[in-house]
Amino acid sequence: MDLTIKKIISWFKWIIPAAVISGLALFAYYYLSSVDLNVEIEEPAVKEIARGWGKIAGGRNGKVIFGQPPKMVIVDLSTGSEHEVPNVVVGGAKGRFKRGQSPRPSWSPDGKRFLYRYNGSIYACDEQGNRQEIRNERMNCTEETRWSWHVKDGEDWAVGPSKDGDGLVVKISNPAIAKTVYGGGDVVKHCEMTGTGKYIVYARRRDVFVARVGTASASDSRQISTGQSCRPCAAPGNHVAWLPIPHTQYMIHDARDGRQTGVLPAPPGEEIYRLNWSNHPDFAVHMYGSRGNVRIHVRRISTGEYLFTGNGWDPDLWVEDH
């Protein structure tokens, strides 16, 4: 009898902690799933945006595109005014586990069109809402992936991950034409090309790597991150960046040799998340969003200056380059 009691007690020592942990995990799942990440927050005044942008940008025109599900919205930074892109519906509604559906827009270098993702497809679109689906069977367009716009020799290409883990470019005017620009087979979700067209930065699970365009083996890529990391992005030049945890700063590297060249910290009291470089090497935009408050900040990288421009998902910035 004593032996049986001891076995029961021993069994309970294991089952009770496991039940508690499972219960907490289940509670966390349902709680976080119900969190509204599109929390209404105070919007900055139009004049405040225009004044702040004028100070940061030195007279350049600029605009930010972002999702406010189910809308796609553009803010003209020079005036502070915003408008909705007609005929465009985007995903990324309420709940922590639905944020991967957000549109991840990417401006073309001339600021006339943009790419965005919706319902498993990539589209090229202009500000009037005229859109074209970019479809190629090799493209990975699943949640969390982002396709960015690249121009080479006057031709427009969409850059992103393939279904088999390579880096891919797809011709926007004729999506049947696709080329492998990195063949390591280890790209997971995130893959961008530098503006020079010479390097790819990508995520391999929880690490970030850089590879020269044309590299065919994962063994020839260079790891630039340390510790848990994500969200790699590429600049118009040869720089790339990645996000460590906690989300307090982006680490900036020279893609040519992997050397760290700078740090872009979050604004005081905020976090930094989903950084996207603009078409100008000194300007970027990011959001504060993993804790339920989707705030957008435009940044000047060389000075660290920041400007709060409103709330929304996955912003991208275009800046007049003169």
Image: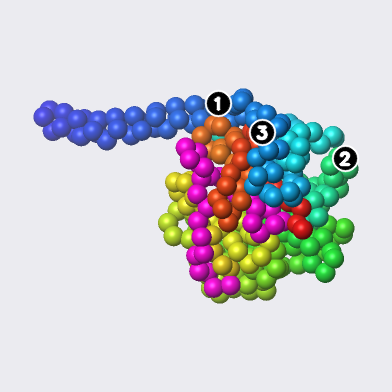
x 58%, y 72%: residue: 256
Q: CA distance from mark 2 to mark 3?
A: 26 Å
Say which residue label 2 marks.
128
Question: Quick one: label 2, few (<14), some, or many (20+) residues within 10 Å?
Answer: few
x 83%, y 46%: residue: 125
Say which residue label 3 marks.
48
Is 257 situated left or right of 61 in this image? left
Q: Secondary structure at mark 2?
A: loop
**Kind of residue at badge 1:** Ser
x 61%, y 51%: residue: 300
**Kind of residue at badge 3:** Glu
**Of callouts 2 and 3, which one flags the residue occurring earlier in the amino acid sequence?**
3
**Of callouts 3 and 1, which one flags the residue occurring earlier in the amino acid sequence?**
1
**Kind of residue at badge 2:** Gln
x 70%, y 57%: residue: 280
Expressed as whole percent of the image width and height from the top left, the position of residue 59 reads 73, 48
Q: How is the image coloured?
A: rainbow
Question: Quick one: label 3, few (<14), some, or many (20+) residues within 10 Å?
Answer: some
Of the numbered discs in the image, which one, if any, rests on residue 34? 1
* Whether label 2 touches label 1, CB < 8 Å: no
- Residue nearest the observer in this picture, 37 or 97: 37
Q: Nearer the viewer, mark 2 or mark 3?
A: 3
Q: Secondary structure at mark 1?
A: helix
| 291 up-or-down from 133: above or below | above
Q: Nearer the viewer, mark 3 or mark 1?
A: 3
What span is in magenta?
A: 256-285
Expressed as whole percent of the image width and height from the top left, the position of residue 283 reads 65, 53
| 56 up-or-down from 39: above or below | below
